[in-house]
Image: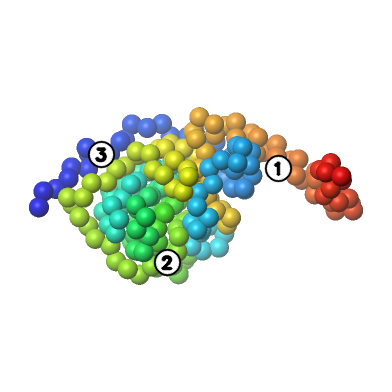
Amino acid sequence: MKKHDPALTTRLDFQRLRSELAAAAARLPTATLHEAGGKIGALPSAIKPVAPRFRFAGSALTVHSPGGDNLWLHRALDVAQPGDVLVVFTGGAYEHGYWGEIMTTMAKVRGLAGLVIDGCVRDGVLLGEIGFPVFARGLCIRGTGKDFGAIGWINHPVTMGDVVVHAGDLVVGDDDGVVAIPQARAADVIAAGTRREAEEAAILRRLEAGEGTLAVYGWK
């Protein structure tokens, strides 16, 4: 069987986010970032944390994996750097457990920020105990293959729902879901999100004082 050379479809020369931007984004809810950016970047709502209170923010390391095969996820782990978030597209082949305890342990030891996969994972209880943030469509015990002849891509654009994610984009996940913000807009969206949080805090104080939403928002 002819093997595919992964170097042919792997990019290593992309710009990652500044660490201070990722840290600032981690303090903001995903919904706030989505709204602050003009209602952009919401990944499919089916992608959720596999354990409560998982949260991450970091630079996207994108993976286009052949359906039902997780060799390219192992390859992505091998080139990932601390703070990266693996963002994995599986071609719509959701019903496989692409990721589990072994890969989670490696990702945590290497300092990755999280995993977002448009597919399923396995070892749910163990993933929660390890504590590395994994966001997926659900849990599935169906195994995957390792086809050394299959072509995948690392750090090329991937599409999840109606969102195109590029390597180096800001990706943030919390209990509500996952948002991806283009790297070029990340600083502005974070600043707008911070202002939005302050404005909402002021609105909450007015509501706690007895006002109603129609009055607060001027909708009367």
What residue do we see at 22% from left, 37% from top? 8
Single out the residue that lies furthest toward the left. 1
Q: CA distance from mark 2 to mark 1?
A: 33 Å
- Mark closest to the chain's N terminus, 3 or 2: 3
From the image, tell me which residue sits under label 3: 9
Indicate the quadrant where residue 15 lies: top left
What residue do we see at 28% from left, 39% from top? 10
Q: Which mark is residue 139?
A: 2
Q: Nearer the viewer, mark 3 or mark 1?
A: 3
Label 1 near label 2: C-beta < 8 Å? no
SS for dot 2: strand
From the image, tell me which residue sits under label 1: 197
- Mark closest to the chain's N terminus, 2 or 1: 2
Estimate how packed mark 1 is, as few (under 14), some (14 to 19) or many (20 or more) residues with alpha carbons within 10 Å: some
Residue 217 visible, this angle: yes
Residue 79 visible, this angle: no
Is 129 positioned to the left or the right of 148 in the image?
A: right
- Kind of residue indicated by mark 2: Leu
Vertical order, 14 against 200 (above or below):
above
